[in-house]
Image (spheres, grey):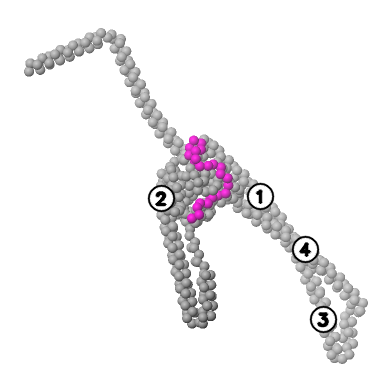
Amino acid sequence: MRKIVSMFSIFALLLAGTFAGSAEKVMAKSSAELQQEINELKKKQDELDKERANALENKDETESELSENIEKQEKIDAQMKDLDQKVSNTASDISSKEEQISKTNNEIEQTEKEIKQLKKEIKELIASIAQREQLLKDRLRTLQKNGGDISYLEVIMESKDFGDFLNRTSAVNKIMGQDQKILDTHQSEKKALEEKKVEVEDKKKQLETKKSNLEDQKKQLESLKAQLDEQLSQKRELMESLEQKEQELHDKKMEFSEQAEILQGQAAAIKAERQRTQQSKQEAEEREAAAALAAKKKREAEQKAEREAQSNNSSSNNSSSSGSSSSSSNNVSPAPAPSAPSTSGFIRPAAGPVTSTFGPRWGTQHPGIDLGSAGASNPIKAVASGTVIKSYYSSSYGNVVFLSHLKGGQVYTTVYAHMQNRTVSSGQSVQQGQVLGEMGNTGYSTGKHLHFELHVGPWNASKTNAVNPSSYINF
């Protein structure tokens, strides 16, 4: 107990000494030093308050900038969609106008042929009428020389008997009938000549009208082409104002609703592909089984016929029958293999040169390849049979089609972007080589081309399944 009390006493003395020393130090400090320390503490507190205020302000600015960027992106997407729609409509109007011009040209050519034919017929009629008029003039001169109709009467009155009278009367009637026929034909051709002259004049007026219409149509076509150039120029300006590379725009995050629609369509397409493949396999097996059964029945029938022939005929006939039967059996061809879905691999999606390859590009990863235009018309084709996941207009990809394929149990996904139009719809089953649309310049695109992607497996927004299409397709 005494030891414990002693220890507490010693501890108390030590504490008293410590506080005494601190007090002495504090007392030793001047008021100026104390004021300096206070000022430094206040300064640090002010800096902390300022940093906190700046952080709050930066947060507000960041959120405001983010909201402004989203609003700007939505505005750009709307502008892009509007421009693509205008370009598409103008291109369609140009195509329609070109067809109209071609039709008018054909009508002009046909009218010119008709005028040429009418002029030929008029020339022939004039020659025929002139020849007939000369014939009629010669006959009139002959009639006048012989006394006109009295010569016919004299011919009749000079008959030797009643039979001769009838013959002479019939001959005179024929001659007079032929003369009347010549006159009728003459009048008819003169009337036809006047009608054809009128028809030629009408055709000439029609021709002038059509040529005038053709000139108007050509002017309208030039105006439409100028309008299209202006719209394309506006789109180029919009693309330049974005100050981003095309690939960066491709990587723009889709709206969650857009991703959800693609993923939902993909699940349905993969299911449809599995059902289609299973059905095709089942149908192929059924055809093979039916073909095998038919071949078996045919062989059994031939063998039965051969046995009956051997038992009923003589040895020589048996030999002949056997030889004939053997020959027939040897000539039996196996049933052809059933027609199954294509398993020959992927085909090229479009003609045209490769303008951008798969891999690193502009500091990012290009998840596909780009094919340039190969002419005025560039159809885009399905690289393999499959089901359409989604066919729609995307703000970045423009007119785009997603396809799901099932080959050898493996799921593949292909993407066809920037098309001028789309000829397939979501959920539709397509065959290898089927046209999906025409190559175009819609969406975030700087020129007419096809952006093509191949994914081994389902599609995802991060494109982690994207592979180099050149490893599967000969470009």
Residue 252 in percent (x, y) is at: 46, 40
The mark found on residue 120 in the picture is 4
Reply yes or no: does residue 205 show up in magenta.
Answer: no
List the residue tagged with mark 2.
264
Q: Earlier in the sequence, mark 4 or mark 3?
A: 4
Between label 3 and label 2, give the one nearer the viewer.
2
Say which element carries label 2: helix
Q: Residue visible at 89% across and 84% down? A: 154
Q: Nearer the viewer, mark 4 or mark 2?
A: 2
Mark 1 burial class by Cα count in 10 Å: few <14, some 14-19, many 20+: some
Q: Which residues are magenta?
A: 343-366
Cα gap from disc 2 to disc 1, whole angstroms = 48 Å
Residue 278 % position (x, y): 42, 58
On the question of residue 397 being in view, the answer is: no
Q: What's under tag 3, amino acid-wise? A: Lys
Residue 386 shown left or right of residue 227 in the figure: left
What is the spatial separation of the Cα atoms under label 3 and label 2, in whole angstroms? 94 Å
Find out whether residue 362 is within the magenta segment.
Answer: yes
What amino acid type should be assigned to the residue bearing mark 1? Lys
Helix, strand or loop under label 4: helix
Which residue is the site of mark 3? 174
| N-terminal label among 2 and 1 | 1
